[in-house]
């Protein structure tokens, strides 16, 4: 049995998706959920630190600025 795969990208529609079709959409969704969970976990852990440590690392200002800038 032969398996033929074709990956097409439609420029401008969704350039961040890894491939067209259902598999690509599922993968992109999975990746975004994983990134969201990691950000949420980081936020929860750092927010649980004492206020003086949060101030030393620039929390929450630096992290929120990074989310807005996308870096």
Image: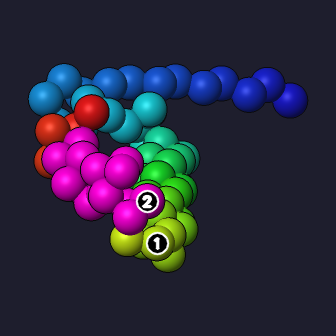
Please check the rendered image and state whether residue 54 is part of the magenta-colored stretch, yes or no: yes
Q: Quadrant of residue 19?
A: top left
Element type at mark 2: helix
Name the quadrant containing residue 11.
Answer: top left
Q: Is residue 59 visible?
A: yes
Residue reaching furthest front?
52
> Looking at the image, which residue is at 20% across and 54% down?
61
The disc at residue 16 is: none
Q: Nearer the viewer, residue 61 or 65?
A: 61
Q: Which residue is mark 2?
A: 53
From the top left corner, tell me how far across and down residue 5 is, in percent: 60, 26
Could you say where residue 33 lies in the image, as x and y percent from the top left? Answer: 47, 61
- Badge 1 marks a residue whose secondary structure is loop
Identify the residue position indicated by label 1 in the image. Answer: 50
Task: Find out whether residue 64 is within the magenta segment.
Answer: yes
Q: Nearer the viewer, residue 4 or 11?
A: 11
Residue 37 visible in image: no
Span colored in magenta? 52-67
How far is the residue under mark 2 from the one under mark 1?
Answer: 6 Å
Q: Is residue 23 above or below residue 37?
A: above
- The residue at 65%/24% (across/down) is 4
Question: In the image, residue 34 lies at what x, y percent?
Answer: 53, 56
Query: Alpha-carbon neighbours of circle 1 within 10 Å: few (<14), some, or many (≥20)?
Result: few
Structural crowding at the residue carrying mark 2, measured as other residues with C-alpha within 10 Å and reported as few (<14), some (14–19) or many (≥20): few
Residue drawn 52% across the image and 24% down it: 6
- Magenta region, main secondary structure: helix
Q: Is residue 8 left or right of residue 70?
A: right
Whether label 2 touches label 1, CB < 8 Å: yes
């Amino acid at each position: 049995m032969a398996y033929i795969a074709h990956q097409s990208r439609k420029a401008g529609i969704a350039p961040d998706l890894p491939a067209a079709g259902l598999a690509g959409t599922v993968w992109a969704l999975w990746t975004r959920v994983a990134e969201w969970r990691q950000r949420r976990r980081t936020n929860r852990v750092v927010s649980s630190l004492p206020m003086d440590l949060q101030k030393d690392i620039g929390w929450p200002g630096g992290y929120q600025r990074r989310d807005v800038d996308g870096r």
